[in-house]
Amino acid sequence: MKKLFSILAIAAMVCAGSFSAQANSYNANNVHEVITSVSSNIIQDADAGAADEAESAGFHQELKKRFIEGGPGFMGIVLLCLILGLAIAIERIIYLNLSTTNTQKLAESVEDALNSGGVEAAKEVCRNTKGPVASIYYQGLDRADESIDAAEKAVVAYGGVQMGQLEKNVSWISLFIALAPMLGFMGTVIGMIQAFDKIEAAGDMQPSLVAGGIKVALLTTVFGLIVAIILQIFYNYIIAKIDSIVNNMEDASITLIDMLVDYKNKK
């Protein structure tokens, strides 16, 4: 009987050891699979990030390479046109945005001040408001004591001055828009001439002789057109902004003259 219990005890210990070993093996396999999966995902993410960085770096390097291949002479002038055109465009955009005012609100404030405190109170409102519309209002109110005709002439004259301020340096942007593709086309012509010179010197028509000149010609044309397209977008935005401000100035001028007529009639 004791021997039977001993045999059963030994068998139970062997089974328990076998189950424990299988469990440890199963846990180890699961841990190994999880670690392998996580490592694979991390490696894939790192490879994707490296690929994106390599693509970005490749684009900049390619752009730089093409710019150098186009020739420093014409490509440098085209780049200068882009820089100067963008500088003027950004300055005009900032100036025009600062010159934009709520003309309806200004007209209401001036009318209230004119009815309550007279011309001096209305002029004070205009002095505290930025923009060409407020300046036109101030000039018209400054001549209000003379006559309506004098105030109207002052508004019209100063409106022309303000339009000149709004359109300042815009013609330079249009010049760069026209100049950039013209320089590109000039580079195209010079590149083709160089290609034919090489053909003439070699006395043979080989693609390798003309490839360089044709490539320079195409690159200068492409970069010139890109510069013209970019500046044209900014130019159209600036012109639209100027037209909007000028329309507001004209409407505000008519409103001011009507206010002065009403003010004179009430006196």
Image (cartoon, helix red, strand yellow):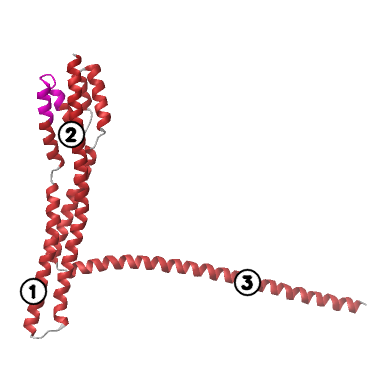
In x, y percent, where is residue 56?
32, 65
Residue that appears at 79% across and 74% down? 13
Q: Give the range drawn in magenta.
A: 139-155
Badge 3 element? helix
Determine whether, in the image, residue 132 is placed left or right of residue 43: left
The residue sitting at the bottom extreme is: 204
Q: Which residue is the site of mark 1? A: 193
Residue that appears at 26% across and 21% down? 112
* Mark linked to residue 250: 2
Closer to the chain start, of discs 1 and 3, is 3
| Distance from Cα at disc 1 to Cα at disc 3 | 74 Å
Kind of residue at disc 1: Ile
Closer to the chain start, of discs 2 and 1, is 1
Q: In which quarter of the image is residue 117?
A: top left
In x, y percent, where is residue 223?
19, 63
Magenta highlight: main SS: helix
| Distance from Cα at disc 2 to Cα at disc 3 | 83 Å
| Distance from Cα at disc 2 to Cα at disc 1 | 55 Å
In x, y percent, where is residue 96?
21, 41
Q: Which residue is the site of mark 3? A: 28
Residue that appears at 19% across and 49% down? 89
Q: Are marks 2 and 3 in contact (CB under 8 Å)?
A: no
Whether residue 95 is visible: no
Badge 2 element? helix
Q: Quadrant of residue 3?
A: bottom right
